Structures are given as C-alpha cells and as structure tokens.
Image (cartoon, helix red, strand yellow):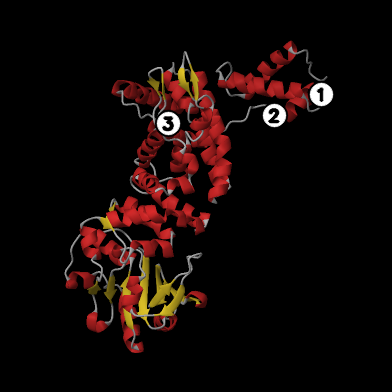
Amino acid sequence: MIELTQEELKSQFSGKIFGQISETADELGLECYVVGGYVRDIFLQRPSKDIDVVVVGSGIAMAEALGRRLGRGAHVSVFKNFGTAQVKFHNVEVEFVGARKESYQRDSRKPIVEDGTLEDDQNRRDFTINALAVCINKSRFGELVDPFGGMNDMKEKTIRTPLDPDITFSDDPLRMMRCIRFAAQLGFYIDDDTFESLCRNRERIEIISRERIADELNKIILSPIPSKGFIDLDRSGLLPLIFPELVALQGVETRNGRAHKDNFYHTLEVLDNISKQTDNLWLRWAALLHDIAKPATKRWEPKAGWTFHNHNFIGEKMIPNIFRKMKLPMNEKMKFVQKMVSLHMRPIVIADEEVTDSAVRRLLFEAGDDIDNLMTLCEADITSKNMERKQRFLNNFQLVRQKLKDLEEKDRVRNFQPPISGEEIMEIFGLEPCREVGALKSAIKDAILDGVIPNEYDAAYDFMIRRADKMGLKKKK
C-alpha cells in the first residue's frame, strides 16, 4: 500500500472524465464522490477500470447531464428500477448511483432503498476498505472521506465490516463470500470479530443463487494463492454448504500403520502449484477437481495398502453434476475439465516407467491440442515431500515433453485421423457398416500409435490389406 497526500490523490483524478464529472456536478449543485474499489485500488496500486460515483441526489440526472456534456462518443444507459445509470465514453465506464440507505427483509438480499446522505451510503458498504470516498466537486476536489478507518485497515491488511458484521452478513449473505474472496485476492486477513460472524451466519448463504456463489468461487480460484480462500471457506463452515464434494476429500485414515495423504490439502497444494503457471480458470478448476472421486473409490487392499483405482474415470463422470449444481457452463469448458481429470494419471504413469514412444504417441493422440495443459496439470500434481522422488518425476516429465515434441514433428499424431477412413474400407472390401470395418480402422490407428507403421497412406494401405487377409476379407474386384 502507498500513502498519498491530498495533492497526490488529486493527481490520480486528473483524467478528462473526472474533470467533466466535477464540472457537471457543480453545474447541477450536487455533491459527487468516487467510491469503493476504484479508490481502494489507487492506494493498493492495483489496476481498476470500474469507476463508481455516488451522487447526493439523482445519479440518473447526473449521468444524463454528463452524457450531454461529453457529446458524441458518449453512451448513457439508464436502469430506473435500480436508480442507477452508466456512462460509456471511449474505453471508460462510469456507474452513477444516488446516495441511499438500505434496509432488508430476512428472506431476501434485495434491499428496500431510500434516498440518503453520503454517510448513509458509506454505512451500507460491505467492508471498510470499500467504503472510501473521494470528493470531486471543485471546492473539495481530491478530499478523502474515510469514516470507518479503511486506510488503517489497508495498512494492517485487514478485512472488516463498517458496522456490526452480523447485520452486514445477515442483510446480504453474498458478502460472506466476498469477504473471503477479497482476503484471497489481496492477501489480507479477516478481522476476528468479522470471521466469527461469518461462522455464525453461514447458514444464510442458502438464500444466495448458485450463479452468484459460482462467480465468487471463480474469483477465489483465480486469486494468487487460491488455497487461502478455500481454507477460510472451510474454517467458516461455508464450504460444506456450497461444495460438499470438496469437503469429502478431507481426513486421513490409517490401517496397519499405513495412512493415505489428506486429499483435501493435497488438492489445494496442486491448485496453488498450477496457479503459479497459468491464469486459465478451467485448468485451475481441473486442478481443484482432479481427485474429486477419491472418497468414492478409496479401498484398503492388504498387499497394496490404500488404493483409489479409476478415480480419474469416476471423477470425469462426476463433473457434469457438479457443474450443473453450481450453474457453471455446461459446454466445451466443462468438457475440457472432464478431459483433464480423465487423463491426469496418464503422464504420471508414463513418467514412473520407461518413457516409450508408443505410450507417448497414445498420450498425444488422446490429449490432442490440450496436451500442454495436461502436462502443466500433471507437473502441479507432484506434491511428494520426498524431494528425490519429486525431482525424478519432474525430470521424467521433461523427458516426456521432449518426446512429445519429437514425435509430433516426426509422426504428426496430434488430433490425427487414420489415413484410411471407414467409408474407404467399406468401398475397398465391399462391406456394409459392420464390426470388421471398425476392427480394421482401429488396427490401423493402433499400428501408427505403436510405431509399427508411419502415419502415411501407403503404409496404412499395405498394413490394412495384410490384416484383412488374416481376417478372411478380400478386396472387391
């Protein structure tokens, strides 16, 4: 965090749009303040595009007057039901709202709204660091209004509510998710009283839509160290209510002196590892879900110890239901996560054994264009505390990556289709669709992947004729 004098703070609002807002507000005789995240992020030196302006009076009238002043290039959108308006000017968006006070009914997070003062408006803010306001009227331009000690909380890296947290969270339970999300995004701590209130009010999350919860979860997953957010969700008791499948990974069972690892904390470590390598939200989701079926597949086998056979395939099948329940997209993004979960064991098996061309070709064929993402996931999945074993795996993964590159250049296996189609096989042998056609096509594919023949038409044709002869099939004359 940086500290700024009023003159330095003024300079942060020197852009054309703020000057125009200031002049418009003074012409209309309205008090006008930039509030919330935009102000907070100036002090935290974070990029922020969303400019929120509170007007003591009509935010809509202010937006419409600003639009007229800016002229061509300005677009004003009015949302009368919410008492808000948005002005877009080139690449800048400004949201205007009249200062208001709010009251809530217990069964809804939609407030009853009345006109209010700046103080009323700051009282209704979720956290002290989001209740900062900077006046942009000419006579007080750049003056910071901080009634709840938000500046001090930023210095102390603390998330705290302006008023009684029980009221803040009970009124709008989504703020509980936002509290944990801000702590994860900013690397802040949640104030003790605020955290205790999270625990007391956790059941209130049930009135929040799954879409809203998923949006906050996505932001936690995209934070620099996502495990921080999930541990806070778990400690507060929110995680069992919103994501019971993840909580089911918790715990260690010991039998005959042999224990398995705690798959919850292993999963969070994998998520943190992959977050150092990629901002791809859906690859991070794949890390979070890669072992999701381990509770369902856990077995004790006297010789082998604890096993989780086929947890990758069972996990793949669990994902559509999880996505549907959480209102996450049921499209190619979900299918990508399924694919990563299904294949996440394959590179590890290859790296733990001799890295053969055949195994690498098959991996490349099945992963296709997602091979690099899969390798990133698998490298993140190596969390062994045995540094020698961990380094051996990572070294072998480098060997796998090099073989992938070499074989792709030599054999063009990624996303390949066998050089001879099923239709051509039927034409050559005078067949209708049948099992023999599929068997021939599969044999050609396997021969290419196993390195028996190159990925070329002539070699595939000769191989097909030989294989067909063994099957008793003859070319059509």
Seen in the image, is 92 located left or right of residue 157? right
Residue type highlighted by circle 3: Cys
Residue 358 picture location, percent across and down: 52, 19
Residue 322 picture location, percent across and down: 54, 44
Give me the residue at 43% from left, 83% from top: 61
The numbered mark, 2 or 1, whose residue comes first in the sequence reads 2
How far apart marks 2 and 1 lie (CA) works out to 14 Å
How far apart marks 1 and 3 lie (CA) works out to 46 Å
Name the foreground residue: 50 vs 108: 108
Q: Which residue is mark 3?
A: 378
**Disc 1 residue crowd, few under 14, some 14–19, many 20+, Cα 10 Å:** few
> Which quadrant holds the C terminus?
top right
Query: Is disc 1 placed on a helix, strand or loop?
Result: loop
Residue type highlighted by circle 2: Ser
Q: Which residue is mark 2?
A: 421
Q: Which residue is mark 1?
A: 430
Residue 186 picture location, percent across and down: 30, 53
| Residue sticking out furthest to the front | 200
Is 247 placed above or below 122 here? above
Residue 431 picture location, percent across and down: 81, 24
> Which quadrant holds the N terminus?
bottom left
Q: Tell me where residue 10 sits by quadrant.
A: bottom left
